[in-house]
Image (cartoon, helix red, strand yellow):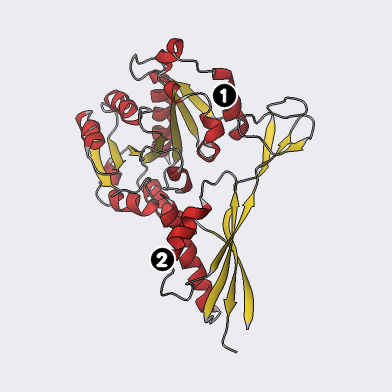
Amino acid sequence: MHELAITENILEIALTHANKANAKNISAIYLVIGQFSSVLDESVQFYWDMISKDTIAQGAKLEFKRIPAMMSCKECGEQFSPNAIEYECPKCGSNSISILQGDEFFLEAIDIDKDE
Amino acid sequence: MNDRIKIVQNIMGANDQIASENRSKLLASNTFSINMMASPGAGKTSLIEQTIPQLKEKYNVAVVDGDIATSIDADRAAAAGATAVQINTGGECHLDAVMLKQALGKIDLPAMDLLIVENVGNLICPSSFQLGTHKSVLIASIPEGDDKPYKYPGMYRGVDVLIINKIDLMPYIPFKMDYFKKGVEILNPGLETFTVSCQTGEGIPGWISWLEEHIDQSKEK
């Protein structure tokens, strides 16, 4: 349900940058979303189709780049993607873990069309 | 002509900007503030009811209550002795910085020592929306089960304090505390944790001391 607010933010950022570049329309939007960010692609797409209507972003393709969580063991240095029910190091069993990636939540780029 | 424009901009930037305005306002009035998040039924309102009577002799407390449609929680906070402001989110599943900004406008902040924001009961959406409060507090409860850190890592990643409520139900529920705490420790190492029961009052004094300490620190600034 929070996807509506998020989709509105995406539209606003995309339109601001497209207008600055004198774009005729936006053809694609590239989103980077880490595993720890709870966002449903389908839901964003659903709201996108509604709110981008009659803007220069109408019909833009939403490209979701999903970043899996990646952890690193502080004891043995093992790097691993955690499974859903255990986070400890799969190699040595340590709970001393640092999180390398998975918090990402940003708009990376847009593709625009210009007149000339 | 087709161009790619590189942007790399935080999707929540607009909300975060308003959140930092809220923070400035709270800092200017020396009001310590917390954003209380939890699943429905974990005990947010019960904890507020336990907390306010123990603070109200010494401190003025305001509660901002986010609820989809009712004022039940705000009424309970007011009955416990707080200045309560209700935000009906109109179906939204979380509070955002703009909603809090509007609520702050209805409170005499310089007169308040503590602001408690009771978020909408939900373990997913509120974690994406910074409000600008000093600390984020998550209330977990024993009946929810010991797998919640693994199912809602985004929420457990982003909080400053964890309260484990309904500890009095431990004998009746197969809750593996070690498994729960292991997930928490990996997601949020060293997270300040209070184990309490709003029913029996167990563990509440530790939580109250923590609050008093932070309220006093905010006053000194």
Find disc 2 in the rendering and name its residue. A51
- Most extreme residue toward the bottom, as rendered? A116
**Looking at the rendering, in which quadrant would you find the C terminus of chain B?**
top left
| Residue drawn at the location 38% of the way across and 20% of the way down | B204
Q: Answer few, some or many: residues within 10 Å of disc 1's Cα (few below 14, many 20 plus, some between 14 and 19).
A: some
CA gap, disc 2 and disc 1: 42 Å
Q: In this view, does B146 lie above or below B31?
A: above
Give how far across and how far down residue B56 sits, in percent.
26, 28
Amino acid type for the residue under numbered disc 1: Lys
Residue under mark 2: which chain is it in?
A
Numbered disc total: 2
Quarter location, residue B72:
top left
| Residue drawn at the location 50% of the way across and 71% of the way down | A59
Front position in the image: B172 or B128: B172
Give how far across and how far down residue B116 sits, in percent.
34, 37
Amino acid type for the residue under numbered disc 2: Ile
Q: Is residue B90 above or below residue B79?
A: below
Give how far across and how far down residue B216 sits, in percent.
40, 33
| Residue drawn at the location 44% of the way across and 48% of the way down | B129
Q: Indicate the secondary structure of the residue bearing disc 2.
A: helix
Horizontal side of residue A98 vs B206, given as left or right? right
Q: Indicate the secondary structure of the residue bearing disc 1.
A: helix
**Looking at the rendering, in which quadrant would you find the N terminus of chain B?**
bottom right
Badge number at residue B181? 1
Residue under mark 1: which chain is it in?
B
Front position in the image: A68 or B200: A68
